[in-house]
Image: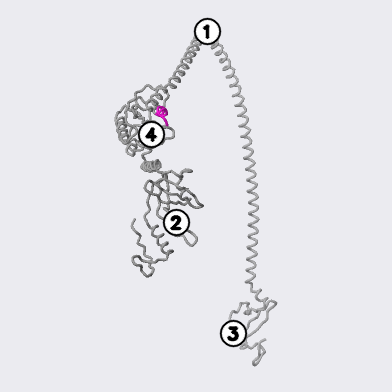
């Protein structure tokens, strides 16, 4: 690590060779900031001196060449998901984090540590991390479902097997097939199952078996071991090869607790070679043969019983044709008598029915005629009443019209005008004078009031025996 060049900006009298002196608190803060800016890295080593406080766990990470004090907050440790007691003295771990420095104070001591934010077990833990990453990648590409979509034969005739030639898995698989009573053909493809050359060899064996058209299923099997021993079956190329094969692959690698990546991409993942035999040959041949024998025996017994029953029935028919004919004749005679009696009853019932119908029809006709006559009389009565009502309304309307005409005529009668105080000027002959010029021309006239007549004359016409200017009468 290069020497830190920390600029504090403190004016001081320089010494002979070094800058300063600096205030220790400011220097500690600058040192803390500079350390936290260093790049974050991964460290691997052995854990020693594990301890805990209320908020963090602290330990030293050592190897043969040195040690680094480390600390991790308890929340980060819980997030790491380590098993209980995994962070202990002697455990080999991989931690991620960076440098940290606590500057201390007047009552607290300074402290330097490597602040870890992630921790996991080394060794097999590294393999598991790589395995999980590859499993996630294959699942995202959809390679874990291709084999499971293939159709598997219930009773394959030829099975391919990839395994070690001298391994116990071979014997267990053959024993499982024998227990199922399978009599097909096994095509062996021997390959190493534990070294760096195992994965390519297994992939080539699988491809060779899949190239043979008679192969209907392929079993890949080996015994148990550690994850490092089984790592060949987690090879990415091998898993991609299995996923793309046209033949369903049955994986039986390890024991019940062992899990490899080939189990994810195979059509069926089995825990043991015996289980693989059951998956490769789903049909239990021995059980099927026993069931087939039971069904054949059942059919044979049923056939024997049916033949006996038919024979007895035919014998009874052969011994009694006359009785059967007599029974049929008796039945025929009985049917004839029933038909004759039924015909007579039917004729009598039809005659009675027709008579009832005729009576009902005549009665209904008579009732309809009476109803029509009654409705006609009622209609005439309604018409007469309507005519009387119309005549009464017409007389009343005529009377009202005459009354209104009389009122109108009386309103135009001159006598009505005279009764209101007016007078009518008339000639002595009774002709009305309608203007002042007519009155002046007439000279003499009469004024008719409602209660009598008064004679009058104009001023220019002196009456007999009168002289000079006299007024009107």
Question: Residue 79 location in percent, x, y?
Answer: 46, 48
Q: Nearer the viewer, mark 3 or mark 2?
A: 2
Closer to the N terminus: mark 3 or mark 4? 4
Q: Are marks 1 and 4 in contact (CB under 8 Å)?
A: no
Query: Could you tell me how far apart the alpha carbons at marks 4 and 2 are, in whole angstroms?
Result: 56 Å
Q: Are marks 3 and 1 in contact (CB under 8 Å)?
A: no
| Residue at position x 40%, y 28% in the image | 273
Q: Secondary structure at mark 2?
A: strand
Mark 4, Cα crowd under 10 Å, few <14 / some 14-19 / many 20+, is many
Question: Residue 127 location in percent, x, y?
Answer: 38, 41
Closest to the observer, 238 or 422: 238
Closer to the N terminus: mark 4 or mark 2? 2
Disc number at residue 440? 3
Q: Nearer the viewer, mark 1 or mark 4?
A: 4
Closer to the N terminus: mark 2 or mark 1? 2
What residue does disc 2 label? Answer: 111
Does the segment drawn in magenta span residue 35?
no
What residue does disc 4 label? Answer: 267
Closer to the N terminus: mark 3 or mark 2? 2
What residue does disc 1 label? Answer: 320
Closest to the observer, 171 or 1: 1
Q: Secondary structure at mark 3?
A: helix
Query: Could you tell me how far apart the alpha carbons at marks 3 and 1 are, in whole angstroms?
Result: 157 Å
Quarter of the rendering occupied by the N terminus: bottom left
Query: In the figure, is residue 256 to the left or right of 415?
Result: left
Closer to the N terminus: mark 3 or mark 1? 1
Q: Secondary structure at mark 1?
A: loop
Does the segment drawn in magenta span residue 276?
yes
Q: Nearer the viewer, mark 3 or mark 4?
A: 4
Closer to the N terminus: mark 1 or mark 4? 4
Query: Could you tell me how far apart the alpha carbons at marks 3 and 4 are, in whole angstroms?
Result: 148 Å
Magenta stretch: give its range.
Answer: 271-279
């Amino acid at each position: 690590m290069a020497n830190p060049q920390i600029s504090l900006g403190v004016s001081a009298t320089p010494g002979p060779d070094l800058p300063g002196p600096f205030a220790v608190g400011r220097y500690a803060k600058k040192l803390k900031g500079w350390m936290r800016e260093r790049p974050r890295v991964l460290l691997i080593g052995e854990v020693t001196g594990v301890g805990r406080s209320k908020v963090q766990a602290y330990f030293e990470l050592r190897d043969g060449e040195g040690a680094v004090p480390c600390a991790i907050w308890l929340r980060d440790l819980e997030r790491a998901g380590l098993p209980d007691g995994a962070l202990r003295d002697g455990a080999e771990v991989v931690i991620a984090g960076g440098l940290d420095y606590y500057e201390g104070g007047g009552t607290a001591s300074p402290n330097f540590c490597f602040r870890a934010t992630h921790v996991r077990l080394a060794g097999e833990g590294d393999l598991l991390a790589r395995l999980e990453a590859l499993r996630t990648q294959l699942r995202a590409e959809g390679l874990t479902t291709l084999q499971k979509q293939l159709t598997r034969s219930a009773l394959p005739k030829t099975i391919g097997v990839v395994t070690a030639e001298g391994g116990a898995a071979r014997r267990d698989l053959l024993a499982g097939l024998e227990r199922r009573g399978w009599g097909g053909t096994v095509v062996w493809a021997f390959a190493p199952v534990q070294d760096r050359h195992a994965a390519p060899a297994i992939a080539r064996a699988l491809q060779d078996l899949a190239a043979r058209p008679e192969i209907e299923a392929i079993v890949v099997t080996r015994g148990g071991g550690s994850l490092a021993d089984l790592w060949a079956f987690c090879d990415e190329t091998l898993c991609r090869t299995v996923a793309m094969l046209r033949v369903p692959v049955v994986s039986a690698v390890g024991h019940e607790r062992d899990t490899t990546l080939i189990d994810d991409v195979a059509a069926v993942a089995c825990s043991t070679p015996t289980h693989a035999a059951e998956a490769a040959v789903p049909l239990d041949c021995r059980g099927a043969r026993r069931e087939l024998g039971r069904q054949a025996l059942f059919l044979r017994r049923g056939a024997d019983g049916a033949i006996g029953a038919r024979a007895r029935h035919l014998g009874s028919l052969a011994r009694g044709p006359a009785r059967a004919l007599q029974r049929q004749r008796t039945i025929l005679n009985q049917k004839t008598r029933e038909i004759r009696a039924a015909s007579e009853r039917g004729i009598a019932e039809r005659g009675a029915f027709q008579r009832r119908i005729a009576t009902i029809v005549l009665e209904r006709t008579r009732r309809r005629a009476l109803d029509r006559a009654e409705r006609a009389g009622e209609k005439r009565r309604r018409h007469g009443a309507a005519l009387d009502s119309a005549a009464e309304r017409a007389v009343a309307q005529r009377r009202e019209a005459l009354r209104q005409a009389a009122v109108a005529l009386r309103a135009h009668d001159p006598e009505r005008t005279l009764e209101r105080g007016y007078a009518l000027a008339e000639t002595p002959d009774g002709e009305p004078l309608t203007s002042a010029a007519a009155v002046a021309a007439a000279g003499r006239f009469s004024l008719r009031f409602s209660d009598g007549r008064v004679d009058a004359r104009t001023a220019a016409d002196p009456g007999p025996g009168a002289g000079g200017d006299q007024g009107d009468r």
